Amino acid sequence: MHTQTRTLPTSDGAAEFARRPAVLLLGIPLVATILITVIRGSRHFGWDWPTHAHHHLVAHIAGTTGLSAVALLVLFQALRYGQRWAWWALLVTGVAVFGGHWVGNVTVGLGTEAALPNTAQAVLTATYALGLARSVPRAG
């Protein structure tokens, strides 16, 4: 049985990986999503909402930030080593994290003036999609 050994990248290789445009295009929207979700989501706790609504808010914040954090780990570990499944995992993550906003917006709406949140989300979604397009695994 033939086993393939993989060497860990050197510090220079890791720095080169981090400078790739695709990594920035994928990483920046994920970090921004974590920050926006925690900062903007947590401001709703002061509102006079029922306990059940607060439960859903906590679930949303935990789910979105958790999934984005795991995607960052996949980005900087598995995709870094060229594992093809990592790209597919990032695709699914993008659909869940960024697509979830658009599905919610279409089905429920924002309930407030939506111009700024939708513009910011559109930029994050487009940036992430461009990062995915630039990092498609090559055949072979």
Image: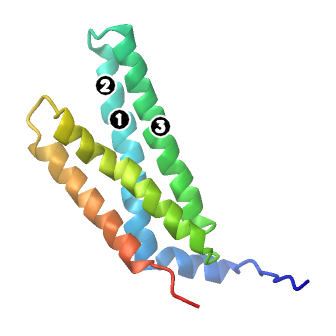
140 or 132: nearer the viewer: 140
What is the C-alpha distance between the residues marked 2 and 3?
17 Å
Classify 41 as above or below 26: above
Give the number of the disc on residue 13: none
What is the C-alpha distance between the residues marked 3 and 1?
15 Å
Q: Residue at x 70, y 79 (%)?
A: 9
Rendered location of residue 6, percent (x, y): 77, 81
The residue identified by callout 3 is 63
- Structural crowding at the residue carrying mark 1, measured as other residues with C-alpha within 10 Å and reported as few (<14), some (14–19) or many (≥20): few
Q: Nearer the viewer, mark 3 or mark 1?
A: 3
What is the residue that sits farthest to the right in this orientation? 1
Pick the quarter of the image with the C terminus: bottom right
Kind of residue at badge 3: Gly
Q: Residue at x 47, y 37 (%)?
A: 63
- Structural crowding at the residue carrying mark 3, measured as other residues with C-alpha within 10 Å and reported as few (<14), some (14–19) or many (≥20): few
Kind of residue at badge 2: Arg
Kind of residue at badge 1: Ile
Mark 2 secondary-structure assignment: helix
The residue identified by callout 2 is 43
